[in-house]
Image: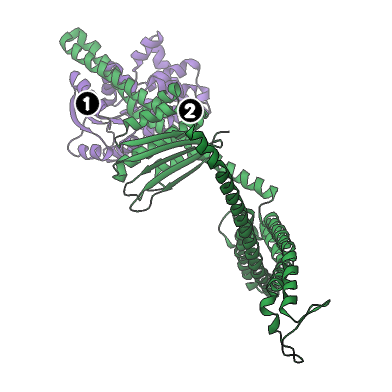
Amino acid sequence: MRVSICEDHALLREGLVRLLEAHECEVLSASEDAAGFLASLEQGLPDVCVLDVRLPPGFSDEGVRAALEARKRHPGLPIVILSQYVERQFASELLRDGEGGLGYLLKDRVADPREFVAALRRVAAGGMALDPEAVSQLLGGSEQGRLAELSPREREVLALMAEGRSNSGIAGRLVISDRAVEKHVSNIFWKLDLPATREDHRRVLAVLAWTEAA
Amino acid sequence: MNEMTAETAAMPTVELEAQEAGFGRRAQALARRVGIDLAYLAAVLGTSVLAICVWVGTLSLTLSLIVFVVGVGVWYVSVYLFRWTTWIDRKLAGWVREEEIVAIYREPRDLTVVERLRCVTTDPQTWKELGWLVLNSVAGFTAAVAGLTATVYVLGLILCPAWWWAIPDPSQQYGTLEMGLYTVDSTGLAFVNTAIGLALAPLALLLNRGLVAAHAALAARILGPSEDQRLQARVADLSSSRAGAVEAAQDQLERIERDLHDGAQARLVSLAMELGMAEEELERNPDAAVETVKRARAEALAALGELRDLSRGLRPALLEERGLTAAIEALVGRSPLPATVSFVGAVDTVPGAVQTAAYFVVAEALTNAAKHSGAERASVRLELAAGRLSVRIEDAGSGGADRNGAGLDGLRKRVAALDGTFGVASPAGGPTVVRAEIPCG
């Protein structure tokens, strides 16, 4: 898996490079700001990009804006945003284009390199990786509109979908059968009134509906 | 024995000298008082004439032009004329009363013409000044003429032998001076006038004294701030310093958040990552794991250091434990720019918030001096007197400090939050003086 990194903190940048190389990833570029990152994409696209939210010069949401810009130039480019805090708004901004291949993780996740790299792989494959912390915040948010129709179990399934888990992964987590998960998932799609398209895409849309409602 | 004799012999002379000196001082003070009173009366003669010109002129112009829009403009200019004219009266009265008489004017809420007009027209100070001009043009003029006439009359009597002969009288060879009860027609009788003049002199001086004191007291009462104005100004002052305090706290919070994010937090993330990697390496490659754990330990120590610096930035440990004197001495010792430090009064007894503010004023000023001034030495002085802690940092550098720089502005807000004053004087070419005065009550 080829990865591009954009992280202004030299220590973390070097650490990430070491971590990824230890897990058989090839680091295509490691930039320290948004401009350097966007320029590096012209040299060749990675399988997944990892960006810090706060980048120079303003240290606010430059990473999110660089990610949106990169997705505009290269539609569907898989991107994982790393953040010190969960900002619900960033998550929904990123998911808005409805394409897959997105992740929003707390920086804390690098403490478990295997799980972290697994999340990167899921995103590179077009899946999702919302941080469990982000997911639980979203769960705690106000429930309104179509989401209110979901049963508690369906909510749990949706939360795990948001973390990027597959049906069998969800089944394992909730200790129910794959069959039951499939039923919950199709109920969710039906209740949220999502168009019948690719299964991956519908999963993303379901999560998007959820982040926007929260 | 010898010494004692010398002392007893010396004593009467010393006493005599002291008496003479005391008498000399009293005479000097009296002469000064008389001079001040006369100068004041002469000045009041001028200002009372100026007052009548100003109020008659401005009011008649304003009232006659008010039907046209121009009159409004004339009114606005008139208000400023009142301010400038009464500025002289305030200075004069302040001079004889040996106090500063300040006028408190309301600030317009914005810079529109209507608001400015509303502001000057509803300002009680405007009407007090107009009232004063009217009063002064009559009462001030009368007082000045009365006092000066009496003085000239008494002087004339005293100096009568020098001029009585010059009064022309067609019927006689010499001049005569008609005094009512008698007629001065000889130098001897002229000296009688001198005696009367000398007897009347204290009365004239007392009259002057009374007139001057009354006039100055009236000026101070009318032109100075009323209790109401004083309170309003105080409220405005407090709300702006409160806003400054809130802003300073906000700035500090943002700085702390940034420091945490860039410093300790990033190091802890890195530490967690190193440990996660070490855990994996332990299974595959224990030698590499040792290196990773070493790096992790270095990260942990660095994070501790960052946290320590951060908490020192909030309230230095030394200040907490040893007090202001020790903390400032340590600060000066750490400064790359050699500095001398002096303390006057029990500066360690001031409240904690004042100590912290004083500490940061010195810290910031010394850092600035070391970075920008090019000076080779600086001096720091802290003095506690009359319930106020004054802090003064001076460097003989090149001056030209940016008074509105973020650092100095932060200090200004910090000091203002404690109801203190903060100032920087830094002319091009130096020296730069930073001073803060904070009440400790």
Q: Quadrant of residue B262?
A: top left
**Image spot of residue B381 (x, y percent):** 42, 37
Q: Residue at x 25, y 39 (%)?
A: A38
**Image spot of residue B404 (x, y percent):** 42, 47
Image height of B230 relative to A37, above or below? below
Residue assigned mark 1 = A14
The shade of chain A is: purple
Residue B45 is marked as: none
The amino acid type of the residue labelled 2 equals: Asp
Q: Is residue A86 visible?
A: no
The shade of chain B is: green
Q: Quadrant of residue A4?
A: top left
Residue assigned mark 2 = B348
Name the chain under label 2. Answer: B
**Image spot of residue A137 (x, y percent):** 45, 23
Name the chain under label 1. Answer: A
